[in-house]
């Protein structure tokens, strides 16, 4: 098992998780522990098992064996309680087209027992921060891709969850939006929010995360402190050398 050792309470505990789609094991007997207040970057190539792991933790996907606990609560037996502790920002733009974006956020908060008055206040604060206030009466289909990414993040935060799970939140976004999201997430983590991030951007992982976990072919192959990983001299360095032949144009 991979342990992220701190003195904090465990936010997420995954033990011997296996999830298969037919004969394909998307996640193969993985174990992982994440302490409260950590910022973990969960890395791996496409198809490695990152999204499947997130879906298993958040209850969006059933799994064949193993157990997952969120702040000590089982995600299967205590689904409603554990789901309320997590805010999920998925890859897909799975937003309701029948509401304008402010009402969409207010409606989302209602799932978690947030009063309408508090939800409206919260929605307007988030929309203002992410520069979406002037779009609050539009439906999401009229937003640009970057605006939709911002809206997904707003939605994930509407009930002020203890854990924020982000599945490639800056994919396809411009530099300005990346830095806005990075600054926002850094501030959230400093305030104690536990953040679980998947990304293909190494700069993003290096800048934001405290802990790096790497999954490949459904197996976790590394997990530990980011700075120790960067300093690890045992990591193999690979180079690609190109040699130009005489009279051959580039």
Image (cartoon, helix red, strand yellow):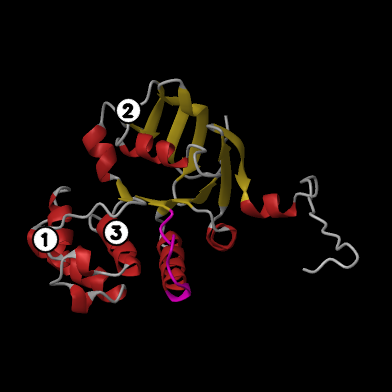
Residue 70 can be seen, yes or no: no
**Residue identifier under label 2:** 62
Q: What is the spatial separation of the Cα atoms under label 3 and label 1, in whole angstroms? A: 14 Å
Q: Secondary structure at mark 2?
A: loop
- What x and y, as percent, mark residue 1? 57, 29
Reading the chain from its start, which is encountered first: label 3 or label 1? 1
When the figure is inspected, residue 67 is found, relative to residue 137, above or below; the finding is above
**Residue at the image point whose x is 40% and y is 62% from the top:** 188
Give the crowd class for mark 3: few <14, some 14-19, many >=20 residues within 10 Å: many
Image quarter of residue 124: bottom left
Q: Where 240 sits versus 134, above or below?
A: above
Whole-angstrom CA distance, mark 3 to mark 2, is 23 Å
Residue found at x 15% / y 58%? 97
Which element is circle 3 on?
A: helix
Mark 1 or mark 2: whose residue is earlier in sequence: 2
Residue drawn 54% across the image and 47% down it: 43
> Does the segment drawn in magenta span residue 169?
yes
Q: Tell me: residue 100, above or below residue 217.
A: below
Residue 19 x %, y %: 42, 26
Query: Looking at the rendering, which quadrant does residue 239 occupy?
Result: bottom right
Residue at numbered disc 1: 99
Secondary structure of the residue carrying numbered label 1:
loop
Q: Which residues are magenta?
A: 168-176
**Which residue lies under the disc numbered 3?**
152
Image quadrant in which the C terminus is located: bottom right
Is residue 44 shown left or right of residue 20? right
At which x and y percent is residue 217?
56, 33
Q: Residue at x 51, y 44 (%)?
A: 46
Is residue 29 among the parts visible in the rendering?
yes
Query: Looking at the image, which residue sits at the far front?
Result: 247
Closest to the observer, 36 or 239: 239
Residues marked 3 and 2 touching at CB (< 8 Å): no
């Amino acid at each position: 098992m991979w342990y992220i050792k701190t003195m904090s309470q465990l936010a997420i505990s995954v033990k011997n998780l296996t999830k298969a789609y037919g004969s394909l094991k998307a996640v193969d007997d993985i174990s992982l522990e994440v302490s409260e207040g950590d910022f973990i970057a969960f890395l791996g190539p496409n198809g490695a098992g990152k999204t499947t792991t997130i879906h298993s933790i958040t209850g969006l996907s059933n799994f064949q064996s193993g157990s997952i606990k969120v702040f000590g609560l089982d995600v299967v037996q205590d689904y409603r309680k554990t789901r309320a502790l997590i805010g999920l920002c998925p890859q897909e733009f799975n937003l309701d087209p029948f509401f304008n974006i402010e009402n969409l956020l207010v409606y989302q908060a209602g799932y978690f027992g947030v009063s309408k008055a508090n939800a409206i206040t919260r929605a307007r604060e988030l929309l203002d921060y992410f520069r979406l206030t002037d779009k609050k009466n539009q439906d999401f289909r009229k937003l640009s891709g970057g605006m939709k990414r911002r809206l997904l993040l707003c939605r994930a935060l509407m009930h002020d969850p203890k854990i924020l799970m982000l599945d490639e939140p800056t994919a396809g976004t411009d530099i300005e939006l990346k830095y806005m999201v990075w600054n926002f997430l850094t501030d959230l983590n400093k305030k104690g929010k536990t953040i679980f991030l998947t990304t293909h951007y190494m700069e993003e992982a290096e800048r934001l995360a405290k802990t790096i976990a790497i999954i490949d072919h459904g197996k976790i192959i590394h997990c530990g402190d980011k700075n120790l990983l960067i300093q690890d001299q045992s990591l193999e360095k690979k180079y690609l050398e190109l040699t130009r032949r005489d009279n051959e144009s580039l």
